[in-house]
Amino acid sequence: MNSKIVFTVVFSFLLFSSCSDDDNDSEELTGSGEVSIKFDNGFAGNDLVLGATNTANTNGEVLTITRFSYIVSNFSLVNDMGEEYVFPKDDSYFIINQELEDDNIVLPEIPAGEYTTLKFGVGVDQEKYLQGAEGQGDFLEKAEASNMMWSWQAGYKFLNFEGNFTSETVTEATEFKIHMGSHGSSLDNYKEVSLALPNKLRVGDEIDSSIHLKIDASKILVATNNIQLTEKSVIMVDEVKSPQIAVNTTEMFVVDHLHNGDAHD
Amino acid sequence: MRPVCHGQVASYKEMNISNYIKFVFIAILLVSCSNDDTEYAPINEPLEFVNPTNFPQATYNFEANPPTKLGFELGKKLFYDGKLSSNGFISCGFCHEQAFAFTHHGHQFSHGIDDLEGTRNTPPIQNMAFLNEFAWDGATNHLDLFPIIPITNEVEMGETMTNVISKLQSDPDYPNEFQAAFEDGEVNSENFLKALGQFMAMMISSNSKYDKYIRNEEGGNFSELEKQGLAIFQQKCNSCHSTELFTDNSFRNNGLPPNPQLNDLGREEVSGASTDRYKFKVPSLRNIEKTAPYMHDGRLGTLMSVLNFYDAGVSDSETLDPLLKNDNRLGIGLSLEEKNALVAFLTTLTDETYLNDPRFAEY
């Protein structure tokens, strides 16, 4: 082997290992870094385009979505030792809104480490409600701007999923509207999601990383529970269907890939 | 000038009465203390919440939102300010008038913006720190969050929280008042709701003739008729209108025939459960003499009509409370004599101190 090539190989190896490399586990991670999470909204494997007609679901229903937004909250990361870092609660409420193209959240000052699991909630937990105004900051105004407030009760919609649909029996485009949230103190629809990461998420000083989630909105209707719009197309406070939709909604999140040491756009 | 720090709790006249338990909340010395170089920093000081001795424990979390003099004053100003509505005219106090225990006098349904009418009768605001469900159907379970409902309701104040906050931000006085009342001093929804929460949490009615009778205080002498009324009440009414708050905080159907024009489903509108149909929050009966008309839709004009209803007007349905289906009859049997005694007793729940307390008054 030509010494020039050897030199190049050795040199580039040194160069790379001095950077934060995905595969280099031996390197000490110190301090803290930023983790951003991208919520890439889609529908059954395609992009979710508001106003565009999607392919039929297994119930033969063809949906055109006009509004899609949801609240994600209470983020935490579990490292390879099984230790959980819980992001400060008051700062841990976010709205993902397809209309406003709000689909990226940033969690600053995550302690250095190698994380293997991402956890978060969909909606607003009862504990938060019972805090009253304390710790609200301006989340209410944000929720209002995204139509996430239920004005007849002082609560949040956890999910807005609206548009129109046709099916074998419903041939005229018909409006559908799904608003899911907790029902006062009588029904808690806040649900938790736990996602194993495909490889380790590395975070530390000058190592900001990101997680790219793919969201499949078709799961809201067809997942563990089968919800047929043909049967009921406006579902807001339904003792039976709302909790089923809450469960389905937790199933729409999948980790697509990570970017270690290079935050996503 | 160095602002003086007042760490001592304020004391009101009625707090000196010896048989009150005092809950002194850890005093937080706010802005005035940390702000050594501000020249005319207003002085803030903690306000003490006094749990009346004959009441159960308050449920409001005073540690999460500790009332202060300036926070309370700000809350009161907001309560009486029409800026909270879209036409700049409808304040909370418009529908909640002090002389009538903060109900909307003379209105079966409260009308708000553009004279649009709601479908429910305005309940009193009193002893809110002891409740854990608000509105007739429990639309929220935290007092702090309640104001969002009337503000954003199109037939009440017809506004958005965002607009209210931006109106307050551009007001000549509010930013300074928020600054003085809260540590971070921001004009945002959190501090806005905290101020209103402080004001409402401090609104306690506990000095009726009945309270004085129970606490053996001066002015608490019951007549024979009133004593008889109390005994009947304890026997026939207080399974639902229980404790010194005269409510068990539950939702029940007391047998009012549904009004098909309104079709108000009650608790079902919040829970979505058909087993909750026509159930409404058991209301407190304090100051009841002043809060006519009665029931969630204000259908009954006098206390005597209420008693006539319990005696002979209760209608059966799947969700009728089982307590009203005893002895092979619907409702609660009451003789005319018993009704008169009950009305005499219910009138002892009027608390003139509360209805005239300058701390809560608009002017």
Image (cartoon, coloured by chain):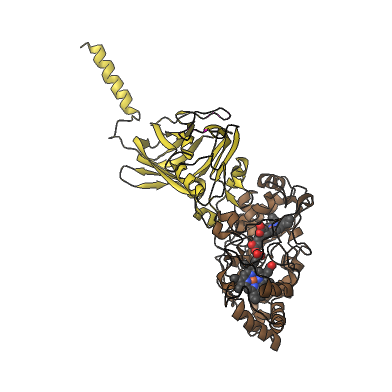
Chain colours: A yellow, B brown
Q: Residue at x 49, y 53 (%)?
A: A188
Type of secondary structure dominating the magenta stretch: loop
Question: Is residue B19 in view?
Answer: no
Q: Tell whether position B74 is magenta.
A: no
Identity of the residue furthest to the bottom in this view: B224
- The residue lying at 60 percent from left, 81 percent from top is B235
Task: Examine the rendering and report whether any part of residue A148 can be seen.
Answer: yes
Residue B72, by quadrant, is bottom right
Residue A60 rendering spot, x and y as whole percentages = 49, 33
Question: Observer-nearest residue: B199 or A165?
Answer: A165
Q: Is residue A54 magenta?
A: yes
- x and y, in percent, of residue B8 in the image: 61, 68
* Position of residue A202 in the picture relative to residue A95 (left or right): left
User: Closer to the camera, A166 or B193?
Assistant: A166
The foreground one among B20 and B308 is: B308
Q: Name above or below for residue A34 compared with residue B196.
A: above
Depicted A93 relative to depicted B2: above or below: above
Reply above or below: A39 against A81.
Answer: above
**The N terminus of chain B is located in which quarter?**
bottom right
Query: In the image, residue B149 lies at what x, y percent?
Result: 65, 53
Q: Quadrant of residue A170?
A: top right
Q: Position of residue B29 (x, y in %)?
A: 59, 61
Tell me which segment is drawn in magenta. Answer: A48-61
